[in-house]
Image (cartoon, helix red, strand yellow):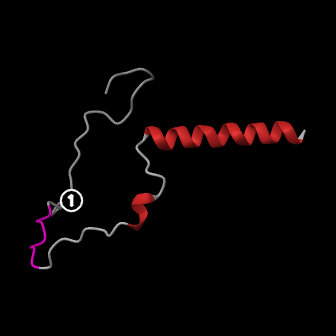
Amino acid sequence: MFGRRLTNLMIVLAVLLATCLACGGDGGEGATATPTVPPAAAEPAPTTQPTGAAILALGKTTLAPNEEF
């Protein structure tokens, strides 16, 4: 019974390791790197946030099953 649990645990760990390596994981080596900080004098980027309420006009409010909208 313990052998089966150990085997399952090893399989899960192997899959996690393979996934990490496939995604370009560096094993945590980059975790101690100093993050890059933008210069203090840089202007903030303009935002494009909506200024008013959005209007949604619908031709229909009730649809039958498999009916296109």
Q: Main secondary structure of the magenta part?
A: loop
Residue, far bottom: 40
Q: How packed is label 1: few (under 14 Cα within 10 Å), some, or many (20 or more)?
A: few
* Nearer to me, 15 or 49: 15
Quadrant the C terminus occupies? top left
Q: Is residue 68 above or below residue 23?
A: above
Quadrant the N terminus occupies? top right
Task: Please tell me whether residue 43 belongs to the stretch shown in magenta.
Answer: yes
* Nearer to me, 58 or 44: 44
Q: Secondary structure at mark 1?
A: loop
The residue at the point 62 percent across, 39 percent down is: 14
Q: What amino acid type is highlighted by mark number 1?
A: Ala
In the picture provided, is 69 more to the left or to the right than 1? left
Q: Is residue 53 above or below residue 6?
A: below
Q: Which residue in the structure is indicated by mark 1?
A: 53
Q: Which of the 4 image quadrants contains residue 49? A: bottom left
Give the x, y percent position of residue 17.
Answer: 56, 43
Residue, far right: 1
In the picture provided, is 26 more to the left or to the right than 54? right
Q: Is residue 59 above or below residue 65?
A: below
State the extent of the magenta-drawn residues as a range. Answer: 41-47
In the picture provided, is 63 more to the left or to the right than 41? right
How many numbered badges does the structure rendering display?
A: 1
Task: Please tell me whether residue 4 belongs to the stretch shown in magenta.
Answer: no
Residue, far front: 29
Give the x, y percent position of residue 40.
Answer: 15, 79
Give the x, y percent position of residue 18.
Answer: 53, 38
Q: Which of the 4 image quadrants contains residue 51? A: bottom left
The residue at the point 68 percent across, 36 percent down is: 11
Give the x, y percent position of residue 38.
Answer: 18, 71
